[in-house]
Image (cartoon, helix red, strand yellow):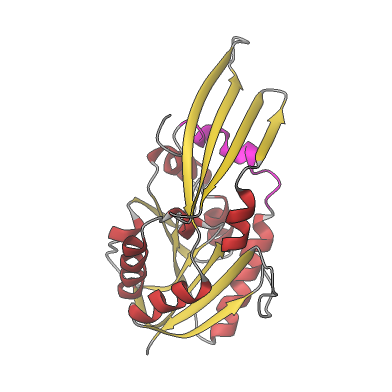
Amino acid sequence: MTQAYTALARCYDRLTSDVSYDKWADHLQRLFRRSGRPISRVLELGCGTGSLTRLLAQRGYAMTAVDLSPDMLCIADQKCQGLEVLFLCQDMSRLRLLEPVDAAVSCLDSLNYVTRPADLKRTFQRVHEALVPGGLFAFDVKTPLALESAGGQTYLDEDDDLFCVWRGEYSPRRRVCGYGLDLFVREEDGSWSRSSEYHEERAYTMDELESALLGAGFRHIERYGDKVMSAPKEGAQRVFFTARKES
């Protein structure tokens, strides 16, 4: 299997056409407003093909967008032509910025893809260093329940020129859900090409995430349900966090 988000990059937007990025951007702006501080410079971790990056840039934010996949960043750069966006190809656990930002965000469970707890702690530390005093960090994660439920499941995505099969397998020992995927794409000459990738997401408990945030120096930690301004309900599949660097 190839490295994650190589073959998948060119089809990613078609496979995620049902994602309401406007709603994600709206929710981030609500969290920004609740912070009570002016936010103009925003860091996005795990920006992928830049759909959310573009929306935030169009809404007036000066964006720095980071991803580990050059293939995804190439598409994101094309999508954001003419907008104030700086793209960086970096491992988020080794994040380095030239200038601090007012807020950092990471959406669509990008942080679950950091499967080593030590790397997650380093990521939080690097984000803390990248923020101005009083800066906001906002992110979402899939809950352990969501990832455990994905084990043993098969997911299909298709259109006339694309067929993708995802197979989930959850390891209780590692607390990791692995997704093997096979991707079939119709080429311009009518033939079909096949490629395979493997992805992993780690199931972090909410207490583990809060402890890692505190260890990195964050304070004023809040939890929210999925794109709502209230606390997550029991059995939630996705939880949002906000945390602030001390002023």
| Magenta span of residues | 7-19
Percent coordinates x, y for residue 143 in the rendering: 58, 64
Is-magenta flag for residue 18?
Answer: yes
Task: Tell me the quadrant of the picture where the N terminus can be found.
Answer: top left
At x 30% / y 74%, what residue is drawn? Answer: 129
Is-magenta flag for residue 163?
Answer: no
Percent coordinates x, y for residue 102 in the rendering: 42, 75
At x 39% / y 74%, what residue is drawn? Answer: 212
Say which quarter of the image contains residue 104.
bottom left
In this view, the residue farthest toward the front is 173
At x 63% / y 10%, what residue is drawn? Answer: 190
Q: Nearer the viewer, residue 174 or 52?
A: 174
Asked if residue 35 is positioned above or below residue 194 in the image, the reply reads below
Asked whether, in this view, residue 219 is left or right of residue 239, the answer is left
Asked whether, in this view, residue 4 is left or right of residue 189, the answer is left
Asked whether, in this view, residue 149 is left or right of residue 119, the answer is right
